[in-house]
Amino acid sequence: MSAPATLLSVRNLSLEFRTRSGTVRALEEVSLDVARGETVGIVGESGSGKSVLSFAILRILDAAARVTSGTIRFAGMDVMAASEAELDTVRGREIAMIFQNPRTALNPIRRVGKQIEDVLRAHTTTLSDALRSRAVECLAQVRIPDPERRYAAYPFELSGGQCQRVMIALALACAPQLLIADEPTTGLDVTTQAAIMRLIRELAREQQMATILITHDLALASEHCDRIIVMHAGQIVESAPAADLFVRPVHPYTAQLIRSTPTPDGDIDGLASIPGNLPDLRRSDLPRCRFLERCTRAVPRCVAEPPNLLEPQADHRPGASIRNEDPAVNVLDCVELKKSFPVAGRPTLRALLRGERRRESRLHAVDDVNFSIAEGESVGLVGESGCGKSTLVRLITRMLDYTSGDIIYRGRNIGFIPARKFAETAFRTKIQMVFQDPTDSLNPRFSASDAIEEPLRRLAGVTALAWLAPLGLLLATLGPQHVLSQIAWLYSELALITFGGAYAVLSHVAERAVLEHGWLLAGQMADGLGLAESTPGPLILVLQFVAFVAAYQSETGGSPVIVGIAASALAIWFLFVPSFLWIFLGGPHIERLNANIGLRTALAFVTAAVVGVIAHLSLWFTAHVLFASVQRVETDLIQILYPMWSSIQWRAVGLTALAAVLLFGLHQNILRTLAVAGSGALLLHLIWPL
């Protein structure tokens, strides 16, 4: 069988941009071929020149761009020498492009069906009467549900995945010979990503269309591409069939790129980041091999000439996996850990005849658990309610005595220390826990400053003047600014009972972190943080909390973290603090998975969690303010907890609460609106006379 004919040929293409700060050499001697019906992936870091290459193929470059050398030929036509009139017959009709962000590529004030009609009108001979039916057919072709109705929709009325499908419909409306897809799945959830890529492959196969897939996701390229081209700093460093590239990478950059990509069956300990950054392409002294300054296997010959990519060279040998040969130090070892609780039951008739008053059985909450945690490792502990997650971490933090087994912390067995005595030892400053509900774990009669000062004074022997400065710096890292501005005032004056859930969480995290302990165990804190932010949604605070923990872990030299969080926040957590995910099923079974496996499962719950939280957000806020208001009936409690609050501040809170309940009511039916408005009026009546 003869090889497919070459559709696109790029030879020795060099391109630069002239800027005020210097000339950026964006592409250097780039050569590639794309055959008819072939799917070619172009991968590399951001800034490696992937998108610039696609713009050059279509010749839609910025005015500051200049092609210094090379040729681009498409179906026999010299693209660089063609006139604009000739290119107009090629762009959109013979070569189509799916841009990276569909919401910015689509016209926001024109219906999507009309935008497809515009493409058909410009590049085909479709009759005006048939334009609408053809546009609806294009929408149906990309599997958009109810295409007749979606024809009249504006881009902002569609989801991200639907907008991406509209972009594909626009690109394929004229049945092009070459499709360029620039990051077509960026910003989409995993399920939609798979559907979009499956759709592109199916349509390419049906229409015998060549495809260039531009992505930074090696896993995506390996699954959907016939051949992969690797770019770095404007150069093509390697080109190979997808199957061969991962088995036998030739260029050192490709080998390191593969090692830095997690796989479902891979070992996360083997992941390695690529040292350094992309070189400044404005430099006049760029080496021939632009990866030279980042390469761990460079030799003097690499300065004068790039490595031969046809065969691995003995003196510039890629391939061997770079790993830390020193085994990680285990911070914690749990060996055959068991915990059971007595459960009283009703005596049987036989037991009564024997004189026994009751029958006692045992509930095995933790049964024969074995695991180790290395220095700097982050571990997610997930499972059904009641499977033993909280019991396990309470055993580790020595809040409970275990039935049998060993708990070894940095080589020392801490299990023999009774739980009641453990708080008096130096280990308590090294192993701390952030509880699931901070409002229950904080003393309601303590101010925030008292709550944070107490463990410092008791465990670390730090005076008030000594901890004020580090506390201020810590609070400045705990996230969002409007909360911090209130925390800066609240932590020294106001009692914790007036805090919302998130404020208490922030204070609680601060209390644990200022001890500079060696451990942090966060029990479903992401949920509490998410409920505290009224706009734009719960995931924002989840991200900020996770970013704080990641930064804290880095600054303290890799303090291990055990996290028990809901599935909606689990995906976000492992994006920032990637390590291992443990599925804790109860009993002796702990399944240890790569974090990216759990990520795929967790992402399915994110949307449902966000919708549920936003729907109840206004009601939640009103309930908290109403609770704080009712407490004012007790005069003695007022004198203790609210010495600094003026009537003006209470009125502001009342008006805010009234607005919240009305806003909640407007999202419901009219009868419920009247009900919540009445509740708001009652709330305002309680607050306003103050």
Image: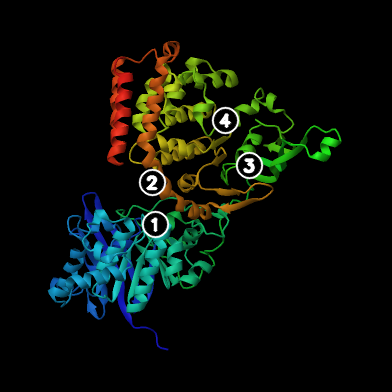
Chain-order first, disc 1 or disc 4: 1
Tag 2: Cα neighbours inside 10 Å, few (<14), some, or many (≥20)? Answer: few
Residue 194 appears in the figure: yes
Amino acid type at image mark 2: Val
**Which numbered mark, 1 or 4, is in the foreground of this view?**
4
Residue 410 in the image: x percent, y percent? 67, 37
Q: Secondary structure at mark 3?
A: loop
Q: Which residue is mark 3?
A: 388
Q: Which residue is mark 1?
A: 45
Chain-order first, disc 2 or disc 4: 4
Question: Up-down: is 377 above or below 216?
Answer: above
Mark 4 and mark 2 in contact (Cβ < 8 Å)? no
Tag 1: Cα neighbours inside 10 Å, few (<14), some, or many (≥20)? Answer: some
Amino acid type at image mark 4: His
Disc 3 to disc 2, how far (Cα)?
A: 29 Å
Q: Which residue is mark 4?
A: 517
Disc 2 to disc 1, how far (Cα)?
A: 34 Å
Which of the pair 676/334 is nearer the observer?
676
Residue 688 in the image: x percent, y percent? 29, 18
**Which numbered mark, 3 or 2, is in the foreground of this view?**
2
Q: Which residue is mark 2?
A: 611
**Which numbered mark, 1 or 3, is in the foreground of this view?**
3
